[in-house]
Amino acid sequence: MNAVNEVSVKAHVLGFPRIGAQRELKFALEKFWRGEIGEGELAQVGQTLRRRHWQWQAEAGLDFVTVGDFAWYDQILNAAALLGALPARFGFDAKRLSLPQYFELARGNTEQFAMEMTKYFDTNYHYLVPEISSQTTFDGGVEWFFHEIEDAITQGHAVKAVLPGPLTFLWLSKSKQDGYSRLDLLPSIVAAYTRVLDKLSALGVGYVQLDEPILALTLPAEWVNAFEPTYRTLADQGVKILLATYFDSVAEHAQLLADLPIAALHLDGVRAPEQLDIFAAIWPANKTLSLGVIDGRNIWAADLTKVLGSLKPWHAKLGAQLWIAPSCSLLHTPVDLEQETKEEQLDVELKSWLAFAKQKLAELNILKQALNGKDVQAELDKNQDAHHARRTSKRIHNSAVAARLAALAPTADQRWADFATRQAAQRARFNLPILPTTTIGSFPQTKEIRAARAAFKKGEITAEQYETAMKAEIALVVQKQEDLGIDVPVHGEAERNDMVEYFGEQLAGFAFTQFGWVQSYGSRCVKPPVLFGDVSRPNPMTVAWSSYAQSLTQKPMKGMLTGPVTILQWSFVRDDQPRSLTCEQIALAIRDEVVDLEEAGIGIIQIDEPAFREGLPLKQRDWAQYLAWAGRAFRLSASGVANGTQIHTHMCYSEFNDILPAIAAMDADVITIETSRSDMDLLEAFAGKNGSAFIYPNEIGPGVYDIHSPRVPQVNEMLRLIAKALEVVPAERLWINPDCGLKTRGWPETEAALANMLKATKEARAAIDEGRQLVVDAAKTGNTSQHSGCACH
Ligand SMILES: Nc1nc2c(c(=O)[nH]1)N[C@@H](CNc1ccc(C(=O)N[C@@H](CCC(=O)N[C@@H](CCC(=O)N[C@@H](CCC(=O)O)C(=O)O)C(=O)O)C(=O)O)cc1)CN2
Ligand code: MET
Ligand SMILES: [Zn+2]
């Protein structure tokens, strides 16, 4: 470290993606799980990646490398393993936890189901939910974190360590015990953190970053009040604390945060720039403030001149107490833009508008140098040119799209008739049996399907050959559903690489990358398309595939689309206009597809919205506005069809007890949801139980089996869930289906599970026909817990 750093602005990142520019970690993990490489080789891949990412941070002139952002599966699981707070049901000794045992926690084993996985705040990243109870101890666990720190020090780096903060860790945990408050564990978790901080101090670590994004939520008072005593205790441990907040404003806690005995605070200046004024008024000039000024959730190059302008007053006030950083961890961005060399996919101009994680390091470097008085005018000018070009580009505006939006009738988001009228028309048209059966859309994405697509993309097979291969797959899927006796079959989505990327590739206004992978969970990644301009649909996207599938069966083939909110949520979205407007544009493009499907004779169309809940703002005060535009976008996409056309929607990740009226207001004729893992608890909320007066008015398909596991559910288990569903939903409005799509499953378990689902349905129908109550012997349902052991993720 040179002396200049002592008095100058410091730069750092909250975290860096761990998966690797070539998804090295993904491939190594999957090889390890298949037994193709050993632990030594896997460890080597991890170390190489960590060292490479630290090296990049050092080369970009950052003042610290961030250590602790690496995880074999998930950083919250890593924290649980470090603190020693593992689910007791596995019977593992946290201090001696082996790597295979760590993966058993994440993926399940033959005795135990995996730890639950859920979305990290409003991101598409999934963490493993720590399981706690009054029995939970935090007596310490694996030393991996400390070894990584030692390694970084050996590599010559100045280290800033990072961990989830104790309050966020507890908040993200789930108590498996009724009436037990997670906050009861605060004293013991704080003691555990104290010991960790002691060790960091002994290792010579200067700063530890504790992530407390829960401060950006609408947080109950008892949690807010816990911050002061917690951080007072932690501040005494000889290592300086940087408390990191992100994803939304923490302005309502400004005074609390200014008074905390911490060395530094990080604020998200991209998601919540308005909070900066509030902090400016009260922040003491002698305390470090880290400003997140580079977007950690998106891939746009920052407007460096503008950012510098906003930093100037802070620099004048804070001097060397000013740090600069991306808004949040770069985990949510792809690794390296330089790998994108296919110009027909991402041309030079578009590329000049973008910055992936590695490029964001370079942006920080320019900002830091500029603030510290270095001449970086050439870099700033280049960045300005790219911004000017983007702002004024003809490629991002399409006057036809604007004109169409302006001309929309106020009723464009309404179906022609109310639900009862539509239901009657659809009943007459489809004449489905009671408790109709269907699936959520995808069937197993086999390695043969992916290999065919890879070969097609590389030009090794022709478009015709690819089409033939996919059609064969569709024919197979349709035949299997015929054999099973499914009432509303699907085509299986073989031709889709991903339910969002597939549409992004075909819509105008989107670009897509070759290597823009972002970790979704464990080894699984997604490649969000880049939504850079006004969206429209030049050509039908799914009609040919769905028509082909329909030609193979007499049954009504269900068309399958991804909804506007989910496309928005799982893409990298332009930041030059409100998301609500962008969503409206996508909605009209999907509406065109819906209308074309109808015209091609597809009478049942599903518009998936699994990310509808995820898009909900972190703060309750912003919910109503979001739900209004998101709901309208969905209805816009769905309302161009006649009464006799049946619109389905599908949602998983369904923690939407709080927003049920908004879900009902989407007015889909049928909604399929994920409920098997919650044992139909969610369904009760849909049915006016749990003290709410709300009753979901339309038809509903609560999932009767968990698709996250290869385990085949038995007939009686599903029958029990159907009986439970029938207690709260009248049979005339109930559908039978799995929780979600089957793309991550293999064929053998898929066929066996669906066969059992059909058997269960038959029994339930017989009971209804005979006017019998459906009684299921719980003892015969096999595993009465909803999960069973599996290697599911
Ligand atoms: N966008 C999005 N977000 C979502 C979900 C979702 O479905 N999509 N579901 C939830 C998360 N669940 C997920 C479930 C599975 C995968 C998943 O399986 N991802 C695949 C990639 C899927 C994909 O894009 N596949 C491409 C192929 C990509 C690839 O790796 N190809 C190989 C070669 C192909 C081969 O021979 O195997 C290569 O290019 O090197 C395709 O089918 O075309 C993976 O990580 O492996 C991701 C998320 C929530 N968020
Ligand atoms: C994450 S929701 C998935 C819905 C999609 N139609 C599928 O079956 O895969
Ligand atoms: Zn789903």
Image (tube, rainbow, N blue to C red):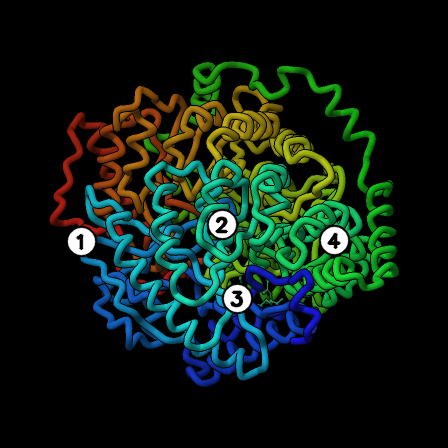
First in sequence, mark 4 or 3: give its number: 4
652 over 167 or under it: above or below: above
- The residue tagged 2 is 442
User: Which disc number belongs to residue 447?
Assistant: 3
Mark 2 and mark 1: span between their CA atoms? 27 Å
Amino acid type for the residue under numbered disc 4: Ala
- The foreground one among 364 and 729 is 364
First in sequence, mark 1 or 3: give its number: 3
If the picture is divided into quarters, which one holds ligand 3?
top left
- The foreground one among 578 and 278 is 278
- Residue 485 in picture, x, y percent from top left: 37, 43
Query: How many marks on residues?
Result: 4
Q: Residue at 35%, 65% (x, y): give it.
A: 791
First in sequence, mark 2 or 1: give its number: 2
Q: Residue at 65%, 62% (x, y): give it.
A: 11
Mark 3 and mark 2: span between their CA atoms? 14 Å
Quarter holding residue 379: bottom right
User: Looking at the image, can residue 471 be seen?
Assistant: no
First in sequence, mark 4 or 1: give its number: 4
Quarter holding residue 758: top left
Instruction: Answer few, some or many: residues within 10 Å of disc 1's Cα (few below 14, many 20 plus, some between 14 and 19).
Output: some
Asked if the beta carbon under badge 3 is closer than 8 A to the nearest atom of ligand 1, the reply is yes
User: Which disc number belongs to residue 782?
Assistant: 1
Q: Residue at 41%, 59% (x, y): give it.
A: 235
- The residue tagged 4 is 301
Instruction: Answer few, some or many: residues within 10 Å of disc 2's Cα (few below 14, many 20 plus, some between 14 and 19).
Output: many
Amino acid type for the residue under numbered disc 3: Lys
- Residue 13 in picture, x, y percent from top left: 60, 61
Amino acid type for the residue under numbered disc 2: Ser
Image quarter hosting the N terminus: bottom right
Mark 4 and mark 1: span between their CA atoms? 55 Å
Cβ atoms under marks 3 and 2 closer than 8 Å = no
